[in-house]
Amino acid sequence: MVSQSGLPFAASGHFRGLTILKLFQEILSESPPHLFLSSFNEHIGGRQIPTYKANTTFNMGLPNDPQKNQVWVDTYASEFSRDIEPNVEVGDIIYQITAACIQLYKQGKTCTEEPQNICCTTVDKDIFQNIYSLVAPGEKDYLLTYDTNEVKTLLSEGWVETCNPFDGPSTFCVKSSLMDGRSGPFIIYKVPQPSSLPLYRCYNSVTHSFAVSNCINGKNEILLGYISQKRGGEMLRGLSRCLGKTTNTFVHSLDLECDRSDGTTLGYVR
């Protein structure tokens, strides 16, 4: 956690155990003489006034909270809590992964020796997809992509990446002076999940848009990934499609209403 955990990307979250796995990769490789594990059963929390001014500065998934100007510092929902105890909402998977990693550490083993250990497997954990948001020169087009090479190419052509307003442990750029964070980056699934829908990037030979299941403005260009039909757990923020500032352009909004709406919320993202 770098900032208040209720804000997008201020805390890494469990990622179904991927965060623990990444931490232990170095531990198992280096085999340090001592290992300190904090926050096994830390259920403390509390709200405070954030230092950020963006319009998305509220606890994820609660845009209409009457106390939205006070954000949770820690233990925000089961996904972003540092607590690894079993709980009713998500079960004991994070606890079991942590226990397996500690056992490997005590035995002096690495994942090379036990690749099928739940501390080492990624097929069940590495299921998330980063989605970058970019704006064309003159705001004549908006585009979503998971491809970092495409991001680099577009930036070299004058496009601008829309950053996240909050500091945190993520791959996305940060611009803490940003006042409007609605069209920033987000995370979805890269493989189908229960109650998920495919999210496509659309193209009509002039501008891009996005849609679930099938494009209505142009043809399906690429499959971006999958979004949840339900708010909760890993996916807290609502994803809406909005009309852009110029004719025939579309942009997205996270958890807040559009300036020019193009319909209802499409689904939920991280």
Image (tube, rainbow, N blue to C red):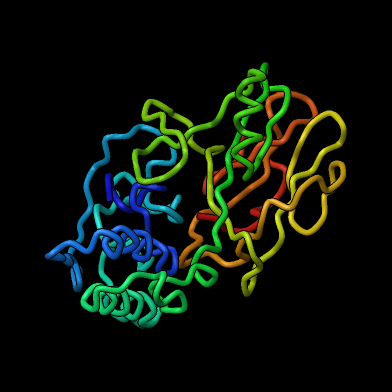
Q: Quadrant of residue 191?
A: bottom right
Residue sitting at x 34%, y 61%: 25
Q: Position of residue 29 (x, y in %)?
A: 30, 61
Residue sitting at x 47%, y 72%: 121
Residue sitting at x 56%, y 29%: 161
Figure check: 45 above or below 218: below
In depth, the one of 140 and 122 nearer the eye is 122
Residue sitting at x 59%, y 39%: 148
Q: Where is residue 227 in the image (x, y as percent from the top left)?
A: 62, 60
In depth, the one of 42 and 115 nearer the eye is 115
In depth, the one of 40 and 106 nearer the eye is 106
Q: In which quarter of the image is residue 156?
A: top right
Give the number of callouts.
Answer: 0
Residue 16 shown left or right of residue 146 in the figure: left
Q: Where is residue 97 in the image (x, y as percent from the top left)?
A: 35, 76
Residue 177 shown left or right of residue 257 in the figure: left
Q: In which quarter of the image is residue 210?
A: top right
Q: Position of residue 249 (x, y in %)?
A: 75, 31
Figure check: 191 above or below 260: below
